[in-house]
Image: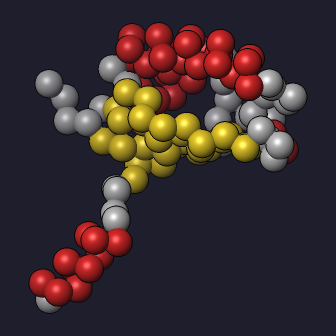
Amino acid sequence: MQKMKFFIDTHDQTRGSFPAEISKEDFAGFYEAYETACAEEGVVSLRIHVGFDEGRAFCLNMAPSAEAVRRVHEKVGLMFDTITEVTTVTPGDMYFVGKAA
């Protein structure tokens, strides 16, 4: 099994990467296709934060590579602004790092 990493991709209507005037109902239908594409590429969609009024979305995925996340977006015809590999850090993580020093 490939090592999985975390990625956040961003979408912004002002940059043309978030569908204009998409409704919550339309988004729900779109998300079904997104999940299917994720399964085909070995990507796990963990969380999507959507600001419908602002036309922005931030998606957290677990995937073997940024390339796999890019392919998912291509399959569903969704542009993105960035795909960034991230490490999850909680306040507790930072507390214990400081105490270990």
Left-right relation of 81 to 65: right
Please tell me whether residue 49 is drawn above or below residue 96 in the rendered image: above
Q: Residue at x 35, y 72 (%)?
A: 91
- From the top left corner, tell me how far across and down residue 40 is, in percent: 39, 11
Q: Quadrant of residue 50?
A: top right
Q: Quadrant of the N terminus?
A: top left
Left-right relation of 76 to 84: right
- From the top left corner, tell me how far across and down residue 39 is, in percent: 38, 14
Q: Residue at x 48, y 17 (%)?
A: 35
Closest to the observer: 97 or 2? 97
Q: Residue at x 21, y 79 (%)?
A: 97
Q: Quadrant of the C terminus?
A: bottom left
Left-right relation of 74 to 67: right
Please tell me whether residue 89 is drawn above or below residue 24 in the rendered image: below
How many numbered marks have been drawn onto this rendered protein structure?
A: 0
Q: Residue at x 56, y 11 (%)?
A: 33
- From the top left corner, tell me how far across and down residue 48 is, in percent: 55, 37
Closest to the observer: 31 or 3? 31
